[in-house]
Image: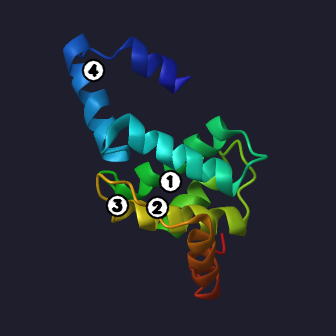
Amino acid sequence: MSGIFGKMFDMRSKEEKQRDFEAYSKRIFPYGDSHREKVSEILSALYPKTNIKYLRMYYILLKEETTGENAVDFETAAKKLTKKSMVKATPELNADLHALLLADSIIDENLNYPSIEELRASAKNLISLGKANI
């Protein structure tokens, strides 16, 4: 309900809302639509049987929590979002997404992400270090 009231009483101009949305989009996918599509491709390859919209939303929410104004570590973000997620957030899923977020944090405009196998190896390493057992 608060979301509805928040939108009703949002007194920002259309231009301010657009500027805020663009800033948010730039933070989540700094390299634009091609960046979003590349992340979506990777998510689909990692979890082909999972609804991509829900999986991408979970990824975006994790990224928002870990890079936003009041950023928290991945484990804290995952614990907070697991109950609200439309996907079954298993330790393996969280480890894979953590590995993808780490890769995403150092990516440049060429969008040369690690392979799926490399991401999975990184995720297994995170699990063995106790960094993704949510």
Left or right? Give the position of 55 relative to 29. right
Q: Could you tell me if the residues under marks 2 and 1 are in contact, i.e. CB atoms within 8 Å? A: yes
Left or right? Give the position of 102 relative to 31. right
Q: Which residue is at 56% across, 41% downward?
A: 57
> Nearer the viewer's eye, disc 3 or disc 1?
3
Helix, strand or loop status at disc 3: loop
Q: Which residue is mark 1?
A: 62
Helix, strand or loop status at disc 4: helix
Say the numbered circle drawn on residue 17: 4
Residue type at numbered disc 4: Lys
Q: Residue furthest bottom?
A: 129
Q: Which residue is mark 2?
A: 101
How far apart are the two marked residues, 2 and 1, measured between alpha carbons? Answer: 8 Å
> Nearer the viewer's eye, disc 2 or disc 1?
2
> Where does the N terminus fall, quadrant-wise?
top right
Which is more toward the observer, 95 or 71? 95
